[in-house]
């Protein structure tokens, strides 16, 4: 069961999904992040377990711990599988499409990413891109195949 912290800015109970990379304060949304940034004063970082090689270096402005909560860890894609994305010729060919690149850029810059993603999942090109990525990091299990 996932237990979330209250937002340190608006106080919404159990809503804080993110942490400030400077002071580790919890917040729940982009508006709360912006409000927190205006008054953030970095303190000593809490003691953290040793980092694996898949985690960005300590001097990076963001770390996985800033983005993922314990409940999100199960959704984390291992670095080895992410590297497969960079090796995929099919994915590389899809990314040559300027329309797809513009869609991805728009999603990256959007404040309301989830509603934009729902809209873009109606675009055949975007669906093809998403399916390609998923088939690389989570290859479909072979159905109706007897083990040897």
Image (cartoon, grey):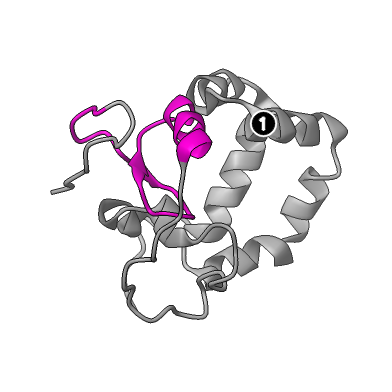
Circle 1 residues within 10 Å: few <14, some 14–19, many ≥20: few
Identify the residue at image location x=47%, y=57%: 138
Task: Residue at 79%, 30% (x, y): give it.
Answer: 102
Instruction: Give percent across and percent down for residue 84.
Output: 63, 67
**Could you tell me residue 65's position as x and y percent?**
40, 60
How many numbered marks have been drawn onto this rendered protein structure? 1
In the rendered view, tell whether residue 142 sits above or below residue 48: above
The correct choice, above or below, for 14 with respect to 124 in the image is below
Answer left or right for 141 relative to 70. right
Quarter in which the C terminus is drawn: bottom left
Q: Residue at x 54, y 27 (%)?
A: 113
Q: Is residue 123 magenta?
A: no
Q: From the viewer's perspective, tell me whether residue 73 is left or right of residue 41.
A: left
Q: Is residue 29 magenta?
A: yes
Q: In the structure shown, which secondary structural element does the residue marked by tag 1 occupy?
A: helix
Instruction: Say if residue 141 shows up in the picture.
Output: no
Say left or right for 91 vs 113.
Answer: right
Q: Which residue is mark 1?
A: 109
Front one among 1 and 38: 38
Residue at the far left in the pictured view: 1
Q: Nearer the viewer, residue 116 or 63?
A: 63
Q: Nearer the viewer, residue 130 or 16?
A: 16
Q: Is residue 18 above or below residue 111?
A: below
Whether residue 132 sits left or right of residue 106 in the image: it is: left
Percent coordinates x, y for residue 33 in the rendering: 46, 34
Q: Identify the residue at image location x=26%, y=52%.
A: 71
Would residue 70 be visible to someone looking at this image? Answer: yes
**Region rendered in magenta:** 11-39
């Amino acid at each position: 069961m996932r237990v979330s912290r209250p937002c340190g800015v608006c106080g919404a109970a159990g809503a804080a999904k993110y942490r400030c990379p400077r002071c580790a304060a919890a917040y729940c949304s982009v508006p709360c992040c912006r409000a927190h940034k205006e008054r953030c004063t970095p303190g000593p970082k809490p003691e953290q377990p040793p980092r694996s090689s898949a985690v960005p270096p300590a001097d990076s402005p963001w770390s996985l711990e800033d983005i993922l909560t314990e409940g999100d860890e199960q959704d984390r894609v291992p670095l080895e599988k992410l590297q497969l994305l960079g090796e995929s010729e099919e994915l590389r060919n899809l990314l040559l499409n300027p329309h797809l690149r513009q869609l991805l850029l728009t999603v990256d810059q959007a404040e309301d990413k989830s509603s934009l993603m729902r809209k873009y999942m109606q675009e055949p090109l975007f669906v093809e891109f998403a399916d390609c990525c998923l088939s690389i990091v989570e290859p479909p299990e072979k159905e109706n195949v007897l083990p040897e």
